[in-house]
Image (spheres, grey):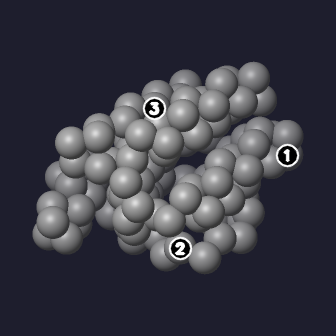
Amino acid sequence: MLNVRTDTTRNRIYITRSGEISEDEATRASSKVISGLEKLDPEFAVVNDVTEYEPVSQETKAEIAKVKRVIDDSRVGTVVRVAPESTIANAQMDRAGEVEYDVEVADGVEERLRLLDARE
C-alpha cells in the first residue's frame, strides 16, 4: 500500500509505504507525489515512512527511481526516511535511482517529525 499526503501549511509531503507494492500502485502514487510537489514551495520536506516496506520488483523500483528524480529536481530541502526493519528493503530504497539530496534516517515517526520541526 502507498499513501501520499501533501501538507501545504508545513510545506511537506508525506509518503507511507507498507507491504507489497505493485507497479500499478507505484505509478498511481507517483502521480500523486508529482501533483503534490507542484503545491509546495522550494525547500519543502519529504517524510518517507517505509517501516513496513517490502522489497519490490525491478519495474516498481524503476517507478520509485523516477519519483526520486522528480523530488530531486523540485528543489527539495529535507528528506527524512523512517527506516524499515528490513535491511534489504532499506538498501533497495537507497539503490532506486541516484539523487543529489541527502536522506536523514529516523527510527520512528516521533523522531522524524522532531528532525523536521527542528529545522523550522
- Mark 1 belongs to which amino acid? Gln
13 is higher (above) or lower (below) than 116: above
Point out the frontmost of discs 1 and 3: 3
Q: Point out the residue furthest to the right here.
A: 59
- Label 3: how many Cα within 10 Å (few below 14, some 14–19, many 20+): some
- Residue that label 2 marks: 101
Check whether the beta carbons of the residues at disc 1 and disc 2 lie within 8 A of each other: no
- Label 1: how many Cα within 10 Å (few below 14, some 14–19, many 20+): few
Q: Nearer the viewer, residue 49 or 68?
A: 68
x and y percent of residue 98 in the render?
71, 70
- Mark 2 belongs to which amino acid? Tyr
Is tag 3's residue or tag 2's residue first in the polypeptide sequence? 3
- Residue that label 3 marks: 4
Is tag 1's residue or tag 3's residue first in the polypeptide sequence? 3
Mark 3 secondary-structure assignment: strand
* Residue 11 visible (yes or no): yes
Figure quadrant of residue 88: bottom right
Check whether the beta carbons of the residues at disc 1 and disc 3 lie within 8 A of each other: no
Q: Nearer the viewer, residue 58 or 26?
A: 26
13 is higher (above) or lower (below) than 28: below
Name which residue lies at 80% across and 48% down: 62
Is tag 1's residue or tag 2's residue first in the polypeptide sequence? 1
Mark 1 secondary-structure assignment: helix
Q: CA distance from mark 1 to mark 2?
A: 22 Å
Q: Nearer the viewer, residue 102 or 69?
A: 69
- Residue that label 1 marks: 58
x and y percent of residue 43 in the render?
38, 65
- Mark 3 belongs to which amino acid? Val
Is 59 left, or right, of 24 in this rendering?
A: right
Name which residue lies at 15% across and 66% down: 120
